Amino acid sequence: MPREIELFGFFMPTLLPMFLLAFGLQWLLDSVLGRLGFYAHVWHPSLFRFSLFVCLFGAMGLFLY
Amino acid sequence: MSATPSVAGWSGAAWRDAWRVWVGSEVPGWIFVAKTTFAALLALWIAFRLGFDSPRSSMLTVFIVAQPQTGLVLAKSFYRALGTIAGSLATLLLVGLFAQQRELFLAALSLWVGLCTAGAALYRNFRAYAFVLAGYTACLIGFPSALHPETVFNTAVFRVSEVMLGILCAGVVTDLVLPQALGAGLVTMIRGSYREFLGFVTGALRGRLDHGSMERSHDHFVANVIALEAQRDAAYFESPDARVRSDRLRLLNAGYMSSTTSIHMLHQTMQRLRRRECHHALQRLAALYEALAIELMPEEGVMPATAAEAAPLVQRIAAFRDDLPRRIAAARAALEHTADATELLDFDSAAELLQRFTEEMHEYTVSYVALARPGTRAHKPAPPYVAHADWITAALSGARAVVALLSLSAFWIATAWPSGAGAATIACVFCCLFASAPAPVLALRGLSIGFVWGLLAAFICGLLVLPQLDGFLLLAAGMTPFIMVGIKLVTNPKTAGIGVGYSIMFGNIIGVENVTRFDPLPILNDGFASLLGASVAALVFALLVPVDSRRLRRHLVRSLRRQVLMACFGGLGGLRHRFENSTRDLLGQLLAGADRVGGEDRQLLGRTLSVLETGHAIIDLREAAAIGTLSVGSRAALNACIRGLARLFEKPSEQLRRQALEGVTRATDRIETAMQAEGIDTAERTGLRRGRVGLHLLRTLLLDDETFRALSAVENPAIAAPGASHAA
């Protein structure tokens, strides 16, 4: 995959749309987990959420580098 | 309390107590200070590493969005991000249109800022913040571009990146390190307000509360409704759990609002009955009230501490509600022997209100109990919170911002002062930020004091401390004490304004950039520019139709009365909630700037209650007028009556009052004929009876000199004078 993509003559790192995608995915997963009551079994829900996001974003980043 | 012993004489237990008190009261504040300082320095470090244009913007963003609770930070961050993006796009468009013409560009920019300020004044919650940001981001990017249009794209990209970085750092640090969730506070608040309301209701129903405490608690209820909505809005960003509950919270708030209104209307009705000495009706009603009070809370009963404990109340209230028509009919039958027709009508309207209140209390309790169950949806669609948006206030705020910005731009062009753009930006920030504040001049004074101290601190730190240090770690160490002072000031509500001013000024002027310069000249120049900008904003607020001016307040008080027109002409779907909600919101706005010592708050509350009573009666009437089997003539009479009332509330006068009364009398005749007609079913009869009761209430209100005086006091001082004659 290209590391930079062009949008209307403006070059940006592919990581940026990936970041947004990861953010959206995380929001989705977060809602599902919250609805299932999963967070009642987690010690530090925000830390879990943050780590989940890092995992998602990191996994996507692997396609690039 | 005993006399304080000397410290040397303290026992171990006393030391432990003192320690616990200190931990309880001071530690949360210090945790917040440490977290914010850490987040700010982290943002600064990353910004340096990424080579941003002005790393300090990231640090400033952290200062600005910093709040103790996660939800508040996330909500503010979200709207800040939204506003920044909108502002950047707008600037790109403006620069594209007017790149060659500096004057035209500045004029267009001022207009945009004016629009954003007006938007910020329309909304008074976090949404306003998006408008503020859209306005001042345009300034931040736009002013440098007025000189160098070719750099605008880069400036915009960097600005957005810097803000996003600051937001990310603030959000992640607040949420990860010793997080303080909004949810816990929200639960306490909801439980507290339910218990308090239950105690209030039982006291009121048993006739144990005097008029003064009724009014005071109403004031409190209004504040609660607005606070709950704000917290719900922010908690939405916090966790999926809060998002699931968001609808139910909204429903709860709507139930709370309507029950508080009903109980006060009930109280007003009783007051009127007492004034007219209708002892028989009062006696019967008191028995009914007592019965409800026992269902809600037996004499020796305990308050339900949690939503789960309140669950049995739902059945009890429902049983009472289903039994209530029978009880009312029995009481009415007993009353028919002793009371005349008017007293019977008075009894009917009080009984109608009691039924409404019982229904609303049931709704409120159901929503409260539903909160305890995880994962369930709201039991019915929640009505949205309807804020009262005042277009005139908004337009004025917009005009203020335009004037401030245009005059500073002119000053900038005329003097070619290098920091002129900074002054204009600061003026714009404040015009937007305080567009909806109740006392902007006072707030600006606090900020300006903070500015002076921040300038001083930046001077000391930037010129005496930092030149001695080398490398980021030492820079951070050198800045930490100065940053902590500002955030510590923010944690105390009394000095919060000063703290914000200090932090903004310090962060802005310290000017940590990629190429460090230690030069007093730009520090002073930029510092004075900020002070000038703040002064111009304060001047504009003080001179251009001040927000706290009597004229503007009178306008708001008049809009309070005109809320009745909404009840007269608004679409019937969900009208009751919309009317109630926006009236409440307006009252909240008015109370924020009310003169409490002079009794203005009591007057406002009295006026609001009259408006609410009238509005609800009119809505009853309109619902009766919408009944299908009503004859054309009757419907016309009801509509004419509503129009007459609308005219009266638009601009009260004795003549219109007489006409409205005539209209009410005619409508009463019609509706009584309709009620005796053959072939109407129970639902229609109930509707008609409600309309009839509403008409009676309207008649009572119109005849009541005190109510009329309170409502028309704004523009008719002649009527407002006590003892003025009336021919009703």
Image (tube, rainbow, N blue to C red):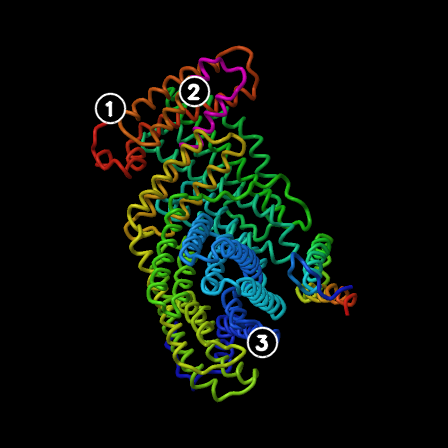
Q: Which of marks 3 and 2 is in front?
A: 3
- Residue B68 spot, x, y in % from top left: 53, 65
Q: Which of marks 3 and 1 is nearer the N terminus?
A: 3
Chain under numbered label 2? B
- B1 in magenta: no
- Label placed on residue B414: none
Q: Which of marks 2 and 1 is nearer the N terminus?
A: 2
CA gap between label 3 and label 2 equals 72 Å
Residue type at mark 3: give it: Phe
Quarter that holds the N terminus of chain B: bottom left
Q: Mark 1 points at which residue?
A: B727
The reply to whether residue B688 is in sight is: yes
Residue B43 vs B206, above or below: the answer is below
Q: Which residue is drawn at 60% across and 54% down?
A: B236
> In this image, B485 relative to A48: left or right?
left
Q: Closer to the camera, B685 or A28? A: A28
- Residue B674 spot, x, y in % from top left: 47, 14
- B618 in magenta: yes
Q: Residue at x 50, y 33 (%)?
A: B575
Quarter that holds the C terminus of chain B: top left
Which quadrant would residue B343 be assigned to in this image? top left
Q: Name the residue under label 2.
A: B638
Q: Mark 3 points at which residue?
A: B48
The reply to whether residue B188 is in sight is: no
> In this image, B546 relative to B19: left or right?
left
* The residue stretch that appears in magenta: B614-636
Q: Residue at x 47, y 81 (%)?
A: B517
- Residue B230 spot, x, y in % from top left: 51, 53
Residue type at mark 1: give it: Ala
Element carrying mark 1? loop
